Image: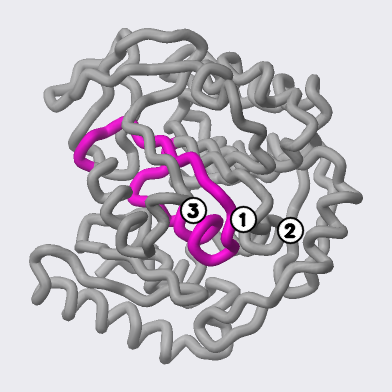
């Protein structure tokens, strides 16, 4: 039992005031999941379900806490409708895709490079009858079309192999620019989680980033770009140049708060010093239009709480 995981579960906003229930979910999963070798079907939000096994770390946090990435996931649900296209880059087993497309009803383009993980993604998409609503692509994204190696045995941390990296388990993956993948589409929102490869991904998405329909981008920024020679400040500069700014979201009050670049940099630095795995940053353009969408969004019910 990980004390760090339990601390995160107990202090999750959706578990405050009901820590005993959270602990019960935690223990029930750890005991029950070992009795279902192929994975267990778990009920989630708005009748969405997913299949998770003991190593599906991209899904398990939602079992413990309802919404693992509380602010970002609540924002995704509140800002998207059936008229929107959500692009999930580095989809893993599909948590954000299921939330955006299954719970919120948006159309989706879900991209996952590692074949074994991609198989789990498509299983979860099909479980929710979303095959006609979500296009799943077993590719990577980058600045240009090429074929590169990805790690294949690091679960949610699988990534493009850098030139100085020596790993045993890899898979060859076709990589395309997002401008090519989305040539005929206009996304409203993107989530990009590519384990440090964000700068090449953004450099291959110049047209997409300038699309008038794109109002939100969620990016994981955790300093891993250093293995490819990139700094997180480069990510912020690319997005600032096309009109995006950093915001924090308060799900219960549905408030968006502007965040200064320096504060974001300080938060990311402190997260890296504490060796925290994930530091998501929300970038928004045309914020007044987004605020209107959020005000009109239906409520989400999760873990007995209304958001």
**Label 3 neighbour load within 10 Å: few <14, some 14-19, many 20+:** many
| Spatial separation of the CA atoms under disc 1 and disc 2 | 7 Å
With respect to residue 264, does 163 lie above or below? above
Task: Report x, y in % for residue 266.
Answer: 69, 39
**Label 2 neighbour load within 10 Å: few <14, some 14-19, many 20+:** some
The span shown in magenta is 90-116
| Spatial separation of the CA atoms under disc 2 and disc 3 | 17 Å
Of the residues under marks 1 and 3, which one precedes in the sequence? Answer: 1
Task: Report x, y in % for residue 185.
Answer: 61, 31
Judge depth for marks 1 and 3 and give the one in front.
Answer: 3
Task: Report x, y in % for residue 164.
Answer: 30, 10
Report if the CB atoms under discs 1 and 2 are less than 8 Å apart.
yes
Of the residues under marks 2 and 3, which one precedes in the sequence? Answer: 3
| Spatial separation of the CA atoms under disc 1 and disc 3 | 9 Å
At horizontal 27% and vertical 81% (from top left) the residue drawn is 27
- Residue 65 visible, this orientation: no
With respect to residue 200, does 84 lie above or below? below
Numbered tag placed on residue 96 in the rendering = 3
Residue 215 vs residue 182: left or right? Answer: right
At horizontal 61% and vertical 20% (from top left) the residue drawn is 205
Q: At numbered mark 1, what does the secondary structure look like: helix, strand or loop?
A: helix
Q: Quadrant of residue 155?
A: top left
Q: Is residue 194 magenta?
A: no
Residue 177 vs residue 218: left or right? Answer: left
Residue tagged 1? 72
């Amino acid at each position: 039992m990980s004390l760090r995981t339990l601390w995160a579960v107990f202090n999750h906003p959706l578990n405050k005031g009901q820590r005993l229930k959270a602990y019960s979910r935690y223990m029930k999963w750890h005991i029950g999941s070992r009795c279902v070798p192929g994975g267990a079907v778990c009920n989630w939000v708005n009748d969405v379900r997913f299949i998770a096994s003991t190593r599906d770390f991209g899904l398990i946090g939602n079992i413990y806490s309802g919404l693992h990435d509380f602010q970002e996931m609540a924002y995704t649900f509140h800002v998207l409708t059936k008229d929107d296209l959500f692009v999930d880059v580095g989809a893993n087993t599909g948590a954000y895709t299921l939330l955006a497309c299954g719970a919120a009803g948006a159309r989706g383009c879900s991209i996952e490079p590692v074949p074994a993980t991609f198989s789990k993604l498509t299983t979860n998409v099909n479980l929710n009858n979303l095959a006609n609503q979500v296009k799943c692509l077993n590719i990577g994204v980058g600045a240009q079309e090429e074929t590169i190696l990805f790690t294949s045995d690091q679960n949610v941390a699988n990534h493009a192999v850098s030139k100085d990296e020596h790993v045993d388990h890899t898979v060859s993956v076709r990589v395309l620019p997002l401008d090519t993948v989305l040539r005929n589409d206009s996304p409203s929102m993107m989530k990009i989680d590519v384990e440090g490869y964000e700068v090449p991904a953004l450099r291959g998405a110049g047209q997409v980033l300038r699309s008038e329909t794109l109002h939100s981008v969620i990016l994981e920024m955790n300093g891993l770009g250093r293995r490819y020679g990139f700094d997180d400040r480069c990510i912020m500069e690319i997005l600032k140049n096309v009109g995006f700014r950093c915001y924090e979201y308060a799900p219960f009050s549905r408030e968006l708060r502007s965040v200064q670049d320096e504060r974001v940099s300080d938060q990311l630095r402190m997260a890296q010093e504490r060796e925290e795995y994930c530091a998501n940053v929300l970038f928004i353009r045309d914020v007044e239009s987004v605020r209107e969408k959020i005000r009109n969004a239906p409520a989400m019910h999760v873990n007995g709480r209304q958001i």
